């Protein structure tokens, strides 16, 4: 996305700060993509890391937006051409359930 570099740069700075602050603490790496791809496996990994008994958990996901993206995002028509072919394009296609337009 255009003009997103300052935002991402700021997040990387926060990430480095948190890594320094918690460098001596026990921690677990958890990636959203891994949780989505293998919920049960990731939850078991978390339960093992926490030292708690495993129990069946079922994710309760609810689609928060059921309207078309052009109705939800005011400047969707302006954004759409600038993001074709990048990671955000993939996200838009997943959210809309359609191919790239």
Image: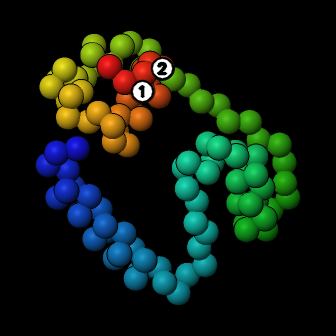
> Residue 68 at what x, y percent from top left?
36, 13
State the residue position of label 1: 93
How is the structure coloured here?
rainbow
Name the outermost residue toward the bottom: 24
Front residue of 12/91: it is 91
Q: Check disc 1: other Cα within 10 Å, few if <14, some if 14-19, many if 20+.
A: some
Q: Quadrant of the C terminus?
A: top left
Identify the mark at residue 36; answer none if there is no mark.
none
Do residues under tags 2 and 1 come within 8 Å of each other at their CB atoms? yes
**Which residue has dot 2 on it?**
97
Q: Secondary structure at mark 2?
A: loop
Height in image: 80 above or below 23? above
44 displayed left or right of 35: right
Q: Is residue 82 left or right of residue 12?
A: left
Q: Position of residue 83 (x, y in %)?
A: 26, 36
Judge left or right: residue 71 versus residue 93. left
Residue drawn where x is 68% and y is 36% of the image: 59
What's the residue at 85%, 58% (across, down)?
53
| Element class at badge 1 | helix
* Residue drawn at point x = 40 percent, y = 82 percent: 20
């Amino acid at each position: 996305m255009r003009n997103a570099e300052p935002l991402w740069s700021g997040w990387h700075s926060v990430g480095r700060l948190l890594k320094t602050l918690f460098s001596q603490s026990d921690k677990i790496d958890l990636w959203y993509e891994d949780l989505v791809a293998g919920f049960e496996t990731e939850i078991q990994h978390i339960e093992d890391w926490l030292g708690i008994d495993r129990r069946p958990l079922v994710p309760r996901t609810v689609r928060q937006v059921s309207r078309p993206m052009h109705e939800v995002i005011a400047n969707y028509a302006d954004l759409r051409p600038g993001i074709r072919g990048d990671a955000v394009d993939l996200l838009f296609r997943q959210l809309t359930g359609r191919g790239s337009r």
